[in-house]
Amino acid sequence: MRLVFLGPPGSGKGTQSKRLVEHFKITHLSTGDMLRAVMTQDTEIGRAAAQSMATGWLVADALVVTLVKERLREPDVQAGFLLDGFPRTVEQARAFEEHLTETHRPLSGVLELRVPLEDLVTRLAGRGRKDDTPEIVRERQGIYRQKTQPLVDFYRQRKLLFPIDGLGTSDEVFDRIVETVQGLKP
Ligand code: AP5
């Protein structure tokens, strides 16, 4: 099973990913977690990640695409993966699509978690991550609408998009996603 999680900051991608990868025995790949892990390194990607986290802006496409492609070569992702936070721009989606075609690994589906803006703001205010200040959250939401929202159409055109209502308890959302994923081709 090769899945992508699409959804604005605070929609519950990280929360649901942790449960889904256990349930479906696949690997969780979060570009946010990967970037937070390299942030303290004095490397091009480390410096870019630190700057992005401080402003809410996206890390350059080429850097993130390289990071993901390298990770996709590792043995633990061969049985399947759930990508959380990638792709995030049309450029990333095109590069990713090309890579999947070259490696003969088509996507099983793209899960779009839908949550109204006012609920997103409340959820993130209660979490307290470094980039969850009201200003940075506003910036991240704006960037999502501008850069990532177009991927909804991108994947809809490819008949890979599966919208999911992200409101309700974590268990309710989880059950909806499991039902959707069970209906996909592996
Ligand atoms: P990333 O770490 O991917 O953050 P994000 O997309 O902004 O998503 P969040 O982690 O904020 O939200 P989430 O949807 O995972 O929600 P969560 O489950 O945590 O990216 C961070 C930064 O890294 C970016 O801004 C960018 O700079 C950089 N980056 C990452 N990927 C990149 C890429 N591909 N290209 C370029 N740059 C990239 O839940 C949020 C809160 O809600 C939690 O407190 C949770 O407990 C609560 N919650 C969850 N579910 C529910 C529910 N059902 N009801 C009530 N509360 C809930």
Image: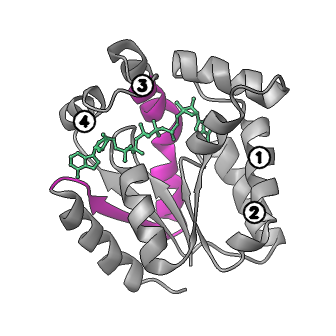
Q: Please report whichever mark, 3 or 1, sits nearer to the chain's N-terminal start.
A: 1
**Neighbours of disc 4 within 10 Å: few (<14), some (14-19), many (20+):** some
Question: What's the distance in space between the residues labelled 4 and 2, CA to CA?
Answer: 31 Å
**Neighbours of disc 2 within 10 Å: few (<14), some (14-19), many (20+):** some
Q: Please report whichever mark, 1 or 2, sits nearer to the chain's N-terminal start.
A: 1
Q: Please report whichever mark, 4 or 2, sits nearer to the chain's N-terminal start.
A: 2
Which dot, 3 or 2, sits closer to the camera?
A: 2
Question: What's the distance in space between the residues labelled 3 and 2, CA to CA?
Answer: 29 Å
Dot 1 corresponds to which residue?
Answer: 67
The foreground one among 60 and 158 is: 60
Which dot, 3 or 1, sits closer to the camera?
A: 1
Indicate if the residue with disc 4 has its beta carbon within 8 Å of ligand 1: yes
Q: Is residue 81 magenta?
A: no
Magenta segment boundaries in residue numbering? 140-168
Dot 4 corresponds to which residue?
Answer: 123
Question: What's the distance in space between the residues labelled 1 and 2, CA to CA?
Answer: 9 Å
Specify the amino acid type for callout 1. Answer: Leu
Q: Secondary structure at mark 4?
A: helix
Indicate if the residue with disc 3 has its beta carbon within 8 Å of ligand 1: no
Dot 3 corresponds to which residue?
Answer: 142
Dot 2 corresponds to which residue?
Answer: 72
Q: Is residue 161 magenta?
A: yes
Place of residue 76 in the rendered image (x, y in percent of width and height, measured from the top left): 71, 72
Specify the amino acid type for callout 2. Answer: Leu
The foreground one among 111 and 16 is: 16
Residue 91: name its quadrant.
Answer: top right
